[in-house]
Each structure stands twice: as structure tokens, then as C-alpha cells.
Amino acid sequence: MPLDLVLRDLHRAEALGAPTRGVAYGESQSGGWWTTSLMNHSGDPHDVVIGDGCPQPTSLLEEMPATARFLDSLGLNFMYVRLARLEPHSYLWEHRDYAELSERGRHRLHVPLVTNASAVLVTAGARVHMGAGSLWRLTPSQAHGVCNSTGLDRLHLIADVYADDTYGALAARPYLRDGDAADLPEMTSADRAGLLERAGGRRVRPDRRTPRGPPRGRRRRPLAGGEGAPARPPLTSPRSLHPRGHRMPTPRTSAHRTHPAGGAGARAPAGAARRPG
């Protein structure tokens, strides 16, 4: 259900007033992705390594009492909690998380603090805008990507939690409003060619099966020590989150709004991983 508006404003004010912007993360993204830890194993907010176990509040969470009370009220068994910021014109390529960790049920909860209509999650062939004022859940072991195309910074409170009875009760009451999610169309060869053209900076003909020859009246310069011409570097897919992005084969989206609940869980085995989110 929607979160209390007063508490939401308090969480947003605490997050925006955080003394650190965060740590830039370089994998699976175009740039503009910053994270700051609120609960981890070292207590250092700049330590952004996700690991199995029982985390402790960082020095940053100690300066955010309203956020700390909200997290405690959920009664969940946390693995890792952070603030995540995605700047405008920034993308997280499609990826899967938790691959390096032990095989145990874990999920991700999002509380959007600052967002806009162009900030969307893409997963399971659907485009989902996680609106502010609600608690959202995601299973990040499924392929997913994120974009913030044109708006302000997208700022989310993100908690990775273990699957237990408390989480099960929380996840048992999902709902989506009309317009929260939309199925994506299949990517055509013309769509793909357009993306390759934008990524490579030159025209790509989607139906051409053979490389284009040299212009008439011009000869290619021979290679040193032999005949031939330098090969053009192959074009690769930018894997960007195009508005007509690639449809995943999974039939349903794994992102849902959900209802808060209470309870407690158990500890998990050791292990660590660093993942974008």
C-alpha cells in the first residue's frame, strides 16, 4: 500500500541531505550510477560490497533516524541496504544479480524517494515505472535493466533481504495500478539496426547481408607487408534500454508494489559479491 506521506518526505529529506553523493560503480552501466551503504558488514558508507550475513548500520544511517525507524518497522532479515542514485541520461544494462552468492532465497525492495516518468525498470518483457510513495519488490536474479532518460536524479532506498516468513507475508499482497507496467513490443531488425547506427555513429542497413565494397574510383591502401585492407571493427549491440527495448522471454514481470509487514528472520552463510542493482 502507499507509504505514509509524512514519513516519505522525511526519508527523502534525509537522503537528499546525506553528506556523501556515493561511490561510482563501473559495471553494467553507462555512467551516472552512485551508491551509498546504509547497512553493510563494515559500517563504512563507502563500502558498497554486498555480502551474506547480518549487516550493521553504517555511520550514515546513524544520521538518518527516520529512515532507520522505517527499516526497523519492516521486521525483515536484511542482507544489505543502500541509497542508489541514477543521473539523467544514464542506463544500467540488462543484467542479473546474486550469481556469486550462495543459493538462498533473497529479494530486493525499492522505496523511490525522487523519481520521474522517464525513470523505468525493464524486466521480463515489461516496462515498469516505480512511482514514489510505495514499497516495490524485485527478484534481481531475473534479467533487469534501468534507465533515467530525461528527468532529475532517480534516488531510491534499496534493501536486499532474505526470503523468510516475514518477507513471504509482505510479498503475498502485491498490486499494480493501471499504467504502472506496460508490455514491450518485440524488437525488429529495423529497431536493432537503428540502435547499432546510433551506437556506431554510421549508417547500418538492416537487410544487407554482405559488406559494402569500396567507393568507385578509389582504391584501398594496402597493408604493410602484403595486400588487403584493414578490417572495420565489428559493430556490437549497445544493449541500451530503447523505448522499444528487447522483450525478455519470461512471461511476467517480477516487479510489484507490496505491503509492509513485521517479523524477523535468520542469518545466512558467508559470501560476498558486488552488484549494480
Image (cartoon, rainbow, N blue to C red):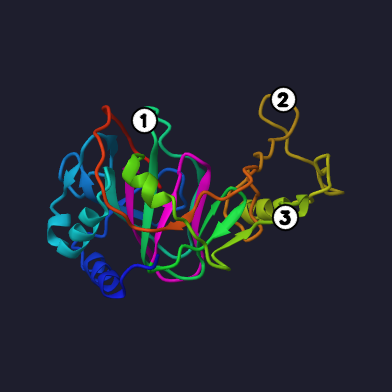
For the residue labelled by badge 1, is the local secondary structure a helix, a strand or a loop? loop
- At label 1, the amino acid type is Leu
Q: What is the CA distance from the residue labelled 1 to the residue labelled 3?
A: 36 Å
Residue 174 image offset from top left, x and y in percent: 47, 56
Q: Nearer the viewer, mark 1 or mark 3?
A: 1
Q: Nearer the viewer, residue 1 or 153?
A: 1
For the residue labelled by badge 3, is the local secondary structure a helix, a strand or a loop? helix
Q: Residues within 10 Å of mark 2 (few under 14, many from 20)?
A: few
Q: Nearer the viewer, residue 233 or 271?
A: 271
Vertical relation: 120 (above or below) 39: below
Name the residue located 25 percent from the left edge and 35 percent from the top edge.
266
Residue 119 image offset from top left, x and y in percent: 48, 64
Which numbered tag is attached to residue 226?
2
Q: Which comes sooner in the sequence, label 1 or label 2?
A: 1
Vertical relation: 118 (above or below) 196: below
- At label 2, the amino acid type is Gly
Residue carrying label 3: 191
